[in-house]
Structures are given as structure tokens and as C-alpha cells.
Image (cartoon, coloured by chain):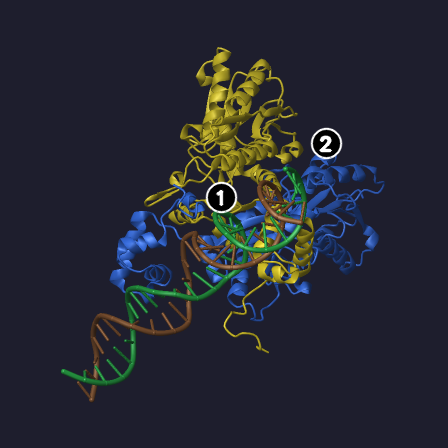
Chain colours: A yellow, B blue, C green, D brown
Amino acid sequence: MKNNKDLPAEEHSGPLMADVARLAGVAISTVSRALANPGRVNEKTRAKIDAAAKQLGYTPNAMARGLRVGKSNVIMIILPGSLYYGVSQVIPLVLQGINRSLSQNGYHLMIANLDRDEASERHILDLAFGGTVRGAIILSSDLPVDGSRSFKDSALPVVSLLYDMSHAALPSVVTNDRQAVREATAELIALGHRRFLYLAGPEGNYHDRERYLGAVEALAAAGLPETAIVRSGGSLDYQHGFQIGVAAAAEFADLILKPTAVIATSDDMAISFMSCVQRMGWKIPTDLSIVSFDGAPACEYSLPPLSTIEQPVEEMGQMAVSLLMERIDAPDKAAALRHVIESKLIRRESFGPAPSNI
Amino acid sequence: MKNNKDLPAEEHSGPLMADVARLAGVAISTVSRALANPGRVNEKTRAKIDAAAKQLGYTPNAMARGLRVGKSNVIMIILPGSLYYGVSQVIPLVLQGINRSLSQNGYHLMIANLDRDEASERHILDLAFGGTVRGAIILSSDLPVDGSRSFKDSALPVVSLLYDMSHAALPSVVTNDRQAVREATAELIALGHRRFLYLAGPEGNYHDRERYLGAVEALAAAGLPETAIVRSGGSLDYQHGFQIGVAAAAEFADLILKPTAVIATSDDMAISFMSCVQRMGWKIPTDLSIVSFDGAPACEYSLPPLSTIEQPVEEMGQMAVSLLMERIDAPDKAAALRHVIESKLIRRESFGPAPSNI
DNA sequence: AGCCGTTTAGCAAACGTTTGCCAAAAATCG
DNA sequence: CGATTTTTGGCAAACGTTTGCTAAACGGCT
């Protein structure tokens, strides 16, 4: 029966603040104040209001609040469109860590995929300029642009994660990619290795560049020629890191002078490379040592267990969140731009001394 | 300069609809109509408005619109708190597929982790009742409750993915877990296997139950006693599926009468189990055949390559989205509740005939 | 040319909060 | 006990859209 007033739509889902106020016998504004800053209202009244709210199962409308105060409580994370290179293994971990930190700060997490198409860029910009989000964590080296709108023109607080974007004035949380690879390579050199194969990621990618440089630096430090390292892959831009490893194994098989150690940009390519190469008959670590990057949990269970440089992704995620929170609370406060959290090599059976019969 | 009564207005960054209207020389309402349903406004005027909007880089404020029309364009996906059992390997794929489908429909994706703590449940309910989200895709078998608010009381359109929740009247997109395992088991039986080890997930979990039943049914159909299968794990509730496999390998080593085939609830446990068991000296598939579930890309590169029952997660995600869209557009329209998308066994080297020296 | 039917533009009222401002009440002090 | 300070409650005006309603403009008929 529609004995009620006829004009308001039946769409209304929940109770309103007005309902709470009525039930508690106070004014709407009092309810608002009681819920927002409980200090500013009489304890007895506050209790009454709380009870009323609970009884009605009242939940404040986030959009109305957002509209009024001009800010939302949503953070967006911008992921590279193709999840399957490199960072693929770590992204779920990152996501989870970030989401947890955000929850603790009362924020929600929205995810946005940055593909290379115009639609996805517009999508993200709508989010950024439409007031929907309050800040962003970006896991990509390029920022979306659409027509006259450019991501960096938005006043949005942004933090870059995994990629060093400090040159673009973005606070960045990164790991010591280069140094970690340099050290790992140095360790391989100390084990007698003199010829290396480097499994590259997509050409020009930040991580690929840094990690490769790390290897090169280690060679230089040991007085080895740059020709001691062979780059594989790189020009390919396969979606799956796994396929890079497969292709690299084929390249490896064709090399006349075999490297004795392999450095991989990511765990997936190392796993598939190792698998292929072993099936071709090479022994790991006897014939060939392998070290990779990322620290995916699965590495522990490959055969042999894969040595990998583990990024403390959980910690990095938390750091990114707390940086973002600072940025939101005090946008103008100058702060360090580049935050490095150290990765460390997990030594497993996939590497050992160079074979003597070089 | 405090004569401005309202100071929060200072903060606002972008151009407003009023600015566009002024620049185009029309009324605000005309702009709104031109942008929303272009058919209802003079083509010439519309072009003028479009140009003005583009020139200003105008983006409509999503919260204001949401408040007015009473709906948002955000879908939330509820993930189980501990990503690391079972579905872990497939979640990134699911997420990506879903996000892509949603984008095409003009929706954004918000993620919510459903941990077992009160805070996370409240978080989700705030989202559901606060008008922030328009619908939800849930990947968990239990629904959040907090005080007097219960998730199912929200009028929110919901679709369940991976879990069959049709008994709770939720449209569900699932795979044929039971049947797929039954068929795989039957295949193992045909290969001569008579004793099985089943690697279980968390006790009572939907997938664990279904998949186990599939194995049991296959035994029954072949006239084998139920004692032909040994359950391992299950009571553990480790975060990492990998650890389940490790524990199971230890159990396996202790068994007096060794099974000749292993059926695993998830790929991660199969991978770690296989790794451990091989290091103990067993040969796969000569001594032991293994089949698992999920279809993680990594399975192709284990040693030996792991046979797994692949869930078409991309397709399942798309189906979930389209179901949700239907539900949003026509909430009352009756529709099938249970949607099954078939998984299929990918046969790789990890299984073969039972050893003859049983 | 006048009438009527069809578009198109504009006004103003919502949507559900927050919050500045003022009044009322309570508390403190002389 | 009255005056002054502190606290607390209520009114109403925003926040930036959408949209029902009405007025105006336009064009096709007779």
C-alpha cells in the first residue's frame, strides 16, 4: 500500500541521518557532529544517538559526505595493463598489503588498469578529475593523458611504487634493483663465473634497465669486458614472462660459447627458462647457475629451488601508503622523494661454483 | 577577506558544469542534458557544448552525480582475506578479466578484502550500505555481518564467483569442480591407479568439498572402496598453499602403503608437494602421478610439467560481470542462478600409468 | 496566416551530508 | 544570586549534479 506520500521514489535503500535524529530526539546536525567528532557533543546525547544509529543500522551516505566536504576516501592504484611481465608475481602481494594499510587509515581501494588504449586512459582521468579518488599509487612508468587533461595536472596526491619516478617529482618507493643485482653478480663472479646470460624484460623498462646495469657494473668492477654478458629477450614484448624464458632457452641452446650463469629480470622467466634448459639436458647448478629477481614464493619449490632477489613488497606497500597519507595531510610539505627499501638475495640451490671445464 | 561565508569552496580544483555552460552560452541544464543523452539536444548546441567542455578539460563530478541519481558506477569485488589458499594463483587473472569487462560497461572496480576480523566486515558493509557501490562480485563463501547490518539485507545486486552460492539465492558462476575431478580421477583409474592421495584445502571449504567428492565418486563408479583414497592436510589452515604441499609430502613419506596417484586441490600445493617428493627420491610420473586444479600458467614449467584442471577464469569473470549487469538493469527479472563454465584437464607429463610393482 | 504539435532551453527543486553562526542552556565565578 | 564564560543544540546554506515542469521557439498543416 502506498499510503505514504507519493512522490519520493521507492529506491531509497537505508535509513537517513534524519531518521536517526528523529529516533534519538535531536536535530540532524547534532547527529552529524556526534558521529564525526564525538568530543563535541554531550556524552549522554552521543550514547543515545549511537544507540539509535545502531538500532536502525544507519550508514552515512559516502557520496553525500564526499560532495559536501569535497573529498572522498578512495585511493586508486594504477596497474600496468599487462600484468604478466616481471612484477606479475608480486602484484597480488602488493595489492593485499596496500589494501590492508589503507583500510587501517579508513580508505578504500579502487583499481585501475592502465592499458595502452585511449579508453583506459580516459577512464583513469575521469577518476582523477571527477573527484572520485583522493589519491593514487601508481605502478607504471608512464602517466595517462587524454586530450587537454593530463594526469599530472590533477591536484591528486600521487606516490609511485616499484618505479623510480622521482625525476618527475613523484615520491617513489623503490628497491635497490641495481645494487642488488650488482651484488648478486659479484657473488657469481666470485664463484668463478665469467660468462653470463641476462634474461631481459621489455626494452626500456625501468626495472630491466636498472637490473641490467647492476650486472654490467659488477662486471666492470671485476675487470671483465662487457662482452662477458649476453642479453637475451628484451625486444619481445610477450604478455607472459614465462614465454620470455622459453625463448631465452632456445637462444641459449644456440650459443656457441655457453654462459655459465644466468641472471633473470623476473622469477617467471627464470622458472620457465630453467625448466626448458633442464629438459634439454643441462644440469643446474652444475652446468649453469641461475639467479632471478622478485622473490615469488613459488621459487622455493622449483627444481632446484631458485635463488631470487626478494623484494619486501609488503613493506614497500605500507611505505607507499604512509607516504600517500602524508601527502594528503600536508600536500605542500617538502619530503624526500626517493625511498629505497632493500631487497636481499635468497641463496638457494640454483647457483653454485662455475663448472671447471670452461 | 573573510566576507565569503563559505571557505571550503576554495579547495575545489576543476571547472564546473556552470563554467562550461557560461563558455558555451547556454544554461547548465542544457549542458547536463547534452552530456548525458546527446539525442535530446540540438546538434549544433551539443557541438558547442562539447567543444567548451573539451577546452576547459571538464570532468563531471562523480559524487555529485551519484548523490543526485542515487547510484554510483562502482562495483566492489570481495576477496577472501587470505589470498594464499587455492584460488591464489587465479585471482590476479580473475581481477584483470573483471576489471576489463567492467570498464567496457563504464564501471570502476573497488576491491575489498574480507578478513576474519570485525573491522574488515564493517568496512565492507559501509561500502555496501553507504551508497558507494552499485553492485558486488563476491569470491567467498560467507557474507559479512556487523551488528544489525547484514550484507544480504543490502539491496545490492550481487553475483558469486567461483563459489556456488545459489542456495543463498545468489547468482553464481562456478566451474564443474566435482565433475572435472571425477573425470580426471577416472582417467587415473583407467591408467591402473588404485591408491590415491588427496591434498585437501582448508576443512569445509567449498572447493575442497566438491573436488574431494569428485574423486570419491570416481572411486565408487569404478567399484573401488573409499579407503582407496587418503586425505592429507585439510585441518591445517596455512596461508600458503605451498606449505600444505610440504606438509603433505611429509605425510606421504610416512605412509606404509604408498598411493600411486595424487590429486591436489590447488596448483600451489601440487607444485610444492611435487618438489619435496622428488627431492626425497620418488620419480614422477614413474612412481607417482599427479593432477591438480586451477590451471596456473606456472604449471607448464614445473618439472615435470604439471597436469592441471584449468578453470577458464577470464570467461568466468566476464560471465560474472554480465550477470551483474543484468541484475543491475533488471533486479526483479528471474534468471538462472547457477552458471557452470567447464574446466578441462590439461594433460602433461606429471601423470602416467601406475607402476607395475604395486 | 493562424493553429497545433513537436522540440529545445531554462528555472528551481531535489539528493544526504557538513558546518558557520547564533541562541539556549549549563557551568563557573564574583 | 546575578553576570560571565563555556558548552551544546538547531537552523539553514552550501557541495555539483540531474530532472520535472513550464515557457518559448520552430515548423508543418489547413
Q: Report helix, strand or loop for mark 2.
A: helix
At which x and y percent is residue A118?
Answer: 38, 47
Residue farthest to the right, as pictured: B256
Instruction: Judge the density around disc 2: few (<14), some (14-19), many (≥20) Cα neighbours within 10 Å.
Output: few
Which mark's residue is nearer the viewer, 2 or 1? Answer: 1
At which x and y percent is residue A130?
Answer: 43, 49
The residue pinned by badge 2 equals B279
Res. A320 mark: none
Q: Real-space Cα distance between discs 2 and 1?
A: 51 Å
Residue A90 sits in quarter? top right
Q: Give the chain of mark 2.
A: B
**Pick the front one: B165 or B116:** B116
User: In the picture provided, is B213 more to the left or to the right than B328?
Assistant: right
Res. A134 mark: 1
User: In the picture provided, is B25 more to the left or to the right than A57?
Assistant: left
Q: Do marks 2 and 1 share a chain?
A: no
Instruction: Judge the density around disc 1: few (<14), some (14-19), many (≥20) Cα neighbours within 10 Å.
Output: many
Q: Which residue shows up at 52% across the image and 26% down it?
A: A339
**Pick the front one: A262 or B41:** B41
At which x and y percent is residue B136?
Answer: 58, 56
**Pick the front one: B163 or B128:** B128
Identity of the amino acid at label 2? Arg
The quarter of the rendered structure image containing the N terminus of chain B is top left
Q: Is residue B312 visible?
A: no
Q: Give the chain of mark 1.
A: A
Q: Is residue B244 visible?
A: yes
**Pick the front one: B88 or A246:** B88
Q: Report helix, strand or loop for mark 1.
A: loop
Identity of the amino acid at label 1? Arg
The quarter of the rendered structure image containing the C terminus of chain B is top right
